[in-house]
């Protein structure tokens, strides 16, 4: 689906200005995308939700399409509830096969979910919540259906900012730049990039990427969550979220200090 076909834009507020002009407390819906699958979108979503919840905001998380489950049968929103605590969650469609939603839908016969439905759910939730986070499936241009609808259409329809979750190491700069360029071309605001899983012992590429990722993303490094964070309990996870996310999300993460600690910058 081309952006222009995704129907009426349902969100009253449109972010027009540069990333620096997007103000956290003024944002009610954020789309969490990533450079691919397994990059830590769910962990980042949980961290943002945990911090917002701790500051008294009522938070909802929407999983647009859950394709494939963890070996224990849980989905992303189970992870979010485990890590972020008291949040409202909405899974819009579930496919058992770990495939792109369009492919999983075609094979299973389970109906697809449209960008308008996802946007509508987010708008409904925004009426009763202070913050709504939408996590897609895989990367930005993974299709929800055979018309070509993607998470980019959801962000565009809502007119809300996107956070890019990226990997730490070699190969992440290209995937991040591709994601950022598509967002730019479609007139979608990107607020910045977050490293989903920062290694305990980062190699040279990961350390250098602290300097290069913001350039690739065309926006600031807004956080880095340590690997293993997903295995923590709620209270410990909240502290990790605070340390690993920028003040934009209510955390303490300082990209310059972080880079300096790794002798970069
Ligand atoms: N910071 C992290 N700490 C612990 N586990 C992580 C972290 N980032 C990613 N993972 C693990 O990697 C896998 C993919 O992470 P996930 O957040 O589900 O990625 P995505 O949502 O982008 O597919 C999961 O098994 C998750 O537990
Ligand atoms: Mg996920």
Image (tube, helix red, strand yellow):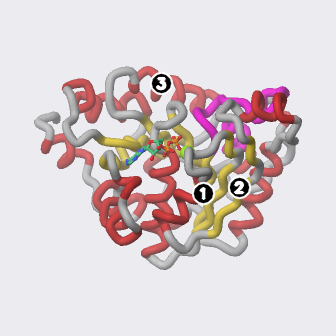
Classify 62 as above or below 82.
above
Q: Which mark is residue 77?
A: 1
Label 3 element class: helix
Q: Which residue is painted at 35% across and 32% down in the image?
A: 213
Classify 192 as above or below 46.
above
Whether residue 75 is visible here, answered yes or no, is: no
Mark 3: give few (<14), some (14-19) or many (20+) Cα within 10 Å: some
Q: Which residue is painted at 59% across and 66% down in the image?
A: 131
Tell me whether the residue at label 3 lies in contact with that at label 1, contact meaning CB atoms closer than 8 angstroms. no
* Residue 208 x %, y %: 23, 28
Tell me whether the residue at label 2 lies in contact with that at label 1, contact meaning CB atoms closer than 8 angstroms. yes
Q: Earlier in the sequence, mark 3 or mark 1?
A: 1
Specify the quadrant of the image occupied by residue 169: top left
Classify 83 as above or below 10.
below
The span from disc 3 to disc 1 (Cα, nearest Å) is 25 Å
* Residue 60 x %, y %: 62, 65
Magenta portion: prevailing SS class: loop
Q: Earlier in the sequence, mark 3 or mark 2?
A: 2
Quadrant location of ligand 2?
A: top right
Q: Which residue in the structure is indicated by mark 2?
A: 91
Q: Which residue is painted at 28% across and 55% down in the image?
A: 253
> Does the magenta-highlighted stretch encompass residue 251?
no
Q: Nearer the viewer, residue 39 or 120?
A: 39
The span from disc 2 to disc 1 (Cα, nearest Å) is 7 Å
Specify the quadrant of the image occupied by residue 133: bottom right
Whether residue 165 is visible here, answered yes or no, is: yes
Residue range in magenta is 136-156
Q: Which residue in the structure is indicated by mark 3?
A: 175
Q: Which mark is residue 257?
A: none
Q: Nearer the viewer, mark 3 or mark 2?
A: 2
Q: Residue furthest front?
A: 72
Label 1 element class: helix
């Amino acid at each position: 689906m081309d952006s222009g076909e995704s129907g009426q834009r349902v969100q009253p507020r449109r972010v027009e200005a540069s990333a620096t002009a997007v103000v956290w407390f003024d944002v009610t819906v954020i789309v969490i995308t990533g450079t691919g699958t397994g990059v830590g979108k769910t962990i980042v979503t949980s961290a943002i939700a945990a911090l917002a919840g701790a500051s008294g905001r009522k938070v909802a998380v929407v999983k647009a399409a859950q394709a494939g489950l963890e070996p224990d049968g849980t989905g992303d929103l189970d992870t979010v509830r485990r890590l972020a605590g008291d949040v409202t969650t909405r899974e819009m469609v579930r496919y058992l096969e770990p495939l792109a939603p369009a492919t999983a839908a075609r094979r299973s016969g389970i109906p697809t979910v449209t960008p308008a439905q996802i946007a509508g759910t987010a708008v409904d939730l925004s009426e009763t919540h202070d913050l709504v986070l939408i996590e897609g499936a895989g990367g930005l241009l993974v299709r929800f259906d055979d018309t070509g609808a993607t998470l980019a259409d959801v962000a565009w329809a809502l007119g809300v900012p996107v956070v890019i979750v990226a990997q730490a190491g070699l190969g992440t700069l290209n995937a991040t730049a591709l994601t950022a360029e598509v967002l730019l071309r479609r007139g979608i605001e990107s607020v910045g990039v977050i490293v989903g899983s920062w290694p305990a012992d980062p190699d040279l590429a990961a350390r250098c990427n602290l300097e290069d990722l913001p350039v690739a993303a065309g926006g600031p490094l807004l956080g880095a969550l340590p690997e293993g964070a997903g295995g923590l309990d709620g209270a410990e996870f909240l502290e990790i979220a605070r340390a690993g996310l920028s003040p934009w999300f209510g955390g303490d993460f300082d990209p310059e200090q972080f880079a300096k600690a790794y002798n970069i910058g």
